[in-house]
Amino acid sequence: MKFFPLRMAMRELRRGKRKFIFFVLCIAIGVAGLVGVKGFNASIQEAMLQEARPLMAADMTLSTGRTITPEQDQFIAATAAERGIQVARVTETTSMALTADKQSFRLVEVKAVELGYPFYGNLEVEPPGARLTDDTAWVGADLLDQLGLQVGDQISVGRAMFTISGLILKEPDRVTAGFSMGPRVMITAGGLAKAELIQLGSRARFKYLFKLADDTQVEQLRADLKEAFKEQRPSIADFREANPQVKRFLDRMTDFLSLVSLVALLVGGLGVANATRAFLQQKLDSIAIMKCVGGTNRKILLIYLTQMLLLSLAGSALGVLLGYTVQLVMPQVVGPIVNLTIELHLQPIVALQGLAVGLVTSVLFTLLPLSAIADIKPGLVFRREMAESRPAPTAARRIRTAALLGAIGLGLVLVSAWMSGSLKWGLWFMGGLAGSVLLLLGAAWLVVRSLKLIRVPRAWISVRQGLASLYRPGSQAGAIVLALGIGITMVLAVYLLQKGLMNEVSITVPKGAPNMVFINLQAPDAEAFHALLQQHPGVAKAPAPTAIVRGRLVTIDGKTRDEMNLSEEEARWFNFQFQTTYTRAIPEGDIVIEGPWWTEADWTKEPLVSIEREAAERLHMTVGSVVEMDLEGGTPIRARVFNIRKTTDYRAGGGFNFVFAPGVLEQNGRITYYAQASVRPGASRDVQRAVVARFPGVTVIDVADMLATVTEMLDRISLVIRFVAGFSVLAGLLILASSIATTKYRRTREAVLYKTLGATRARVWRIFAVEYAALGLIAGFVSAFLAAVATWGVMKYVMEIDYVPDVRSLAVGVLISLVLTIAVGVLSTIDVLAAKPLQVLREE
């Protein structure tokens, strides 16, 4: 008797295997998405750790965006010589690449390397054996395609001409977590000096690669570098860790996608709850008989709970196997975002996590249906009816239900927190999901109730009977609308948000606004550059160049980063290298939201600074705070926050978080300039050609090209989210098929009665199609409403931009919901339509 519940559970499972197919599949779909996302991330990070040296091209790297001083360079050289460490310097920046005739050009990413690069990994170039000298360059295939060049041709980069000697096929340390500004051009450090790309204030990334003589040197070298470069606050990584930037990007993306996958699992949980409830309805007599022969509620509950656990384990295991298949697809989906080629394999930890989450979710969603076992009376065996057993509600039953719902809610919050790595996000996620569930169920209930009031003409028999099916006893319209609605809402909301962002950019950019940005403009060239733009016929408007001084925060109100109570995200803001400027008047497009704007009488008394609102919030600054900043090439300065601003207008060159009053930066910082211009339609190429020919060190960014790059990146990210959210839609369709399967006997009787009364098979099909169409339309319209509301909320309160409803996209979402519901519904009732009346009637 010790294993009696298990033996009874196994006996029922053997006799009714087909009944549990949907139960298993609902869990499997949710677990598959979760394991696929988590497993993909785990495989990449494990491979990054195993191949850390080739991916870094070194044992250790130091990277900074600030100019390295001669003293720091000498320190590295002396340290390397003393400890037997090999060093190679790499510099990355952007510039314009021109053909020899200067008729074609392209914004490119320039990578200058020293002898020794790479220490690990393979740098593959075609043709093999191609040499990289101070007069040659290796380029990416995309640059050759875009400029119509081939190996052996010449390109101009900065103030130097290079012969293309090779085509870059693979770089060991070419790992990205975002979009690139353009094709790759690789030159030597000597070639970089000839091109004169690194000037005062140039935007560049300076990196040192170290090959250690002994792995034990890691800690000491890291500590020495951190001390020597403490003013730059560099990023230091070694072979014991994955690429920090890529790891952070992957972790955030994985946490978000895990929650999206969890939605699919929770939708599957609804299917589990429905399947369990339907199964118990079929077992009313068996449960009543067991109680008649002495079975207690506890023993019977244990039998069916054991059965559900076995099914959950089977579904979770199947989900783990399917999750590995999802992992195989993920590289094609995520590949364009993260430039990694990694061999994937099943991660045991992720598999166990998937099994655990699947089991916990299944148990949580079966608790409420299984609790109904206590309400089944032994006398039911003498009163067999087809109608569902619905005991009258009592105070004890209400308390039990409330307690179970509370336990389920708490369990789901904990699961969400585990998946997201944050209790806060787990609460927000479950709160939003609970609100969506209530809205979907409320809308389904309201619509179904309203259908009772509609007087359909008697001539429309198919419509009349199909709509009546929605509120018949045992109808699962609410569950179907809920399951389908959640999945469609997610997919549609992601698409609307992506499209809304791009539309906002297009709408916000007014006619005649700056559509071309110029960076790396040196102070001696500022006036001549401005004159060139003003005189060019293709330029409609060219404001005076804006002064820029780059700097990093040192203290706020006398406190360093470590002394302030900052979150991880806020601490990253403290580490930013800010672009600052100075001005007398309020910057165009900005408004002061706290404090007054300064006058000459104010700034002559003390150094003053204006802070953009988001920076003030992130760094806990208010009017009166004292900011200490280390300016590039100058001495640290202190300034008092005089006001807080908000940027309300589009600005092609971006806004400034810190704007100083006159008299601060001019004496202390190394000033460079950026400029912007409004270029007339069709004149973009002529303006760029004139600029790069006269000022080869200036980098030109065409806003149209930049927007195209951003759009492409948003498309890729949106595709990833929609792919994972698609599991929720699939789970919803499974629930639809499951609900049809669990009511198959009733539907068969209905079809037979229709046929007996003279209805043709086509008529019966139309009746069912009307029911499915109504379900699809209800789910579609409610999903469209929720997606629009969610998109409006995110854009208005998170991104603070206006949302214009995209009626066309919403209509397409409703149409997709309609088509999917009808298709799955009809396919699930094919055998019902084929039933013979006589065969069914004989069973009555």
Image (cartoon, grey):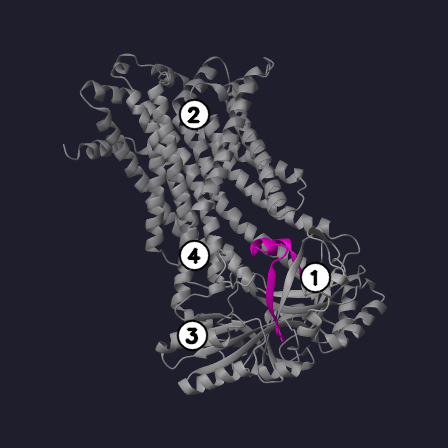
Q: Amino acid at mark 4?
A: Asn
Residue position marked by numbered label 2 in the rendering: 832
348 up-or-down from 462: above or below = below
Which element carries disc 1, helix, strand or loop?
A: loop
Image quarter of residue 835: top left
Q: Amino acid at mark 1?
A: Gly
Q: Earlier in the sequence, mark 3 or mark 4?
A: 4
Tell us which disc is closer to us: 4 or 1.
1
Which label belongs to residue 41? Answer: 4
657 lies left or right of 357: right
Q: Earlier in the sequence, mark 2 or mark 3?
A: 3
Q: Which residues lie in the magenta part? A: 609-636
Tell us which disc is closer to us: 2 or 3.
3
- For disc 3, the neighbor class at 10 Å (few under 14, some 14 to 19, many from 20) is few
Residue position marked by numbered label 1 in the rendering: 653
Q: 552 or 146: nearer the eye?
A: 552
Q: CA distance from mark 2 to mark 3?
A: 74 Å
At x 39%, y 30%, the residue is: 274
180 lies left or right of 534: left
- For disc 4, the neighbor class at 10 Å (few under 14, some 14 to 19, many from 20) is many
Residue position marked by numbered label 3 in the rendering: 223
At x 62%, y 78%, the residue is: 151
Which element carries disc 3, helix, strand or loop?
A: helix
